[in-house]
């Protein structure tokens, strides 16, 4: 392949007096340019592939970091939940032990059964945060229930001394 150049021929007084035509062989230059373009295209494809690979690696690293952070959070929450449950269980156990000690102390003092029942009901109602507690004597499914002792808030009326079995929900019969 040849490159043709056409230029005006000028005289010393800058008058056009003809044409200069030159032919330059550009075959080798075009072959080198084509090889260079092909090599550049290959490098561009390789670069895109590497950049895509790096972007995917970065994305995967982010996903792994998020997953690790979530797992660490779950583990930390699980440890905190276990600690809270253990603390609560210990607190309940300590409260129960303290209640049993108070109950034992209260039950040693009174001499009669009514005073023992009253002391036990008072402590039990306070421990369980009940508005009312009572002890009743039941002598049969069709016989009246006799309230032996009761403990209730100041604003509650006293329980009737006798109740009928029909006064209780079905699960208590």
Image (cartoon, rainbow, N blue to C red):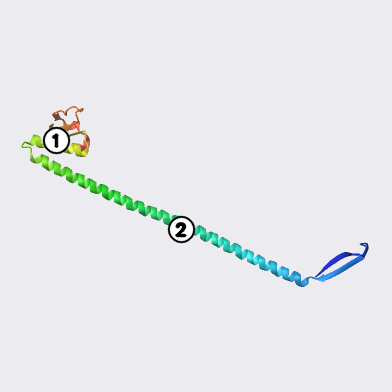
Relative to 111, 22 lies left or right: right
Residue found at x 36% / y 54%: 75
Q: Nearer the viewer, mark 1 or mark 2?
A: 2
Frontmost residue, 39 versus 149 = 39
Q: Quadrant of the N terminus?
A: bottom right
Give the labeled residue for mark 2.
64
Q: Secondary structure at mark 1?
A: strand
As drawn, the label of residue 158 is none
Give the quadrant of residue 13: bottom right
Residue found at x 63% / y 66%: 43
Q: Quadrant of the C terminus?
A: top left
The location of residue 70, given as percent across then percent down, is: 41, 53
Residue found at x 75% / y 69%: 30
The location of residue 47, given as percent across then percent down, is: 60, 64
Instruction: State which tag comes first along the sequence, 1 or 2.
Output: 2
Give the labeled residue for mark 1.
135
Frontmost residue, 19 versus 54 = 19
């Amino acid at each position: 392949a040849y490159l043709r150049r056409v230029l005006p021929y000028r005289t010393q007084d800058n008058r056009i007096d003809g044409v200069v035509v030159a032919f330059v062989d550009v075959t080798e230059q075009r072959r080198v340019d084509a090889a260079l373009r092909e090599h550049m295209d290959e490098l561009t494809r390789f670069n895109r592939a590497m950049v895509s690979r790096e972007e995917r690696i970065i994305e995967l690293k982010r996903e792994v970091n998020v997953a690790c952070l979530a797992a660490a959070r779950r583990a930390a929450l699980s440890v905190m939940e276990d600690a809270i449950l253990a603390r609560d269980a210990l607190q309940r156990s300590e409260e129960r032990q303290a209640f049993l000690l108070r109950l034992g102390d209260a039950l040693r003092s009174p001499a009669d059964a009514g005073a023992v029942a009253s002391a036990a009901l008072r402590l039990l109602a306070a421990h369980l945060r009940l508005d009312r507690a009572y002890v009743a004597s039941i002598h049969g499914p069709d016989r009246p229930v006799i309230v032996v002792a009761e403990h209730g808030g100041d604003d509650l009326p006293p329980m009737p001394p006798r109740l009928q079995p029909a006064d209780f929900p079905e699960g208590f019969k």
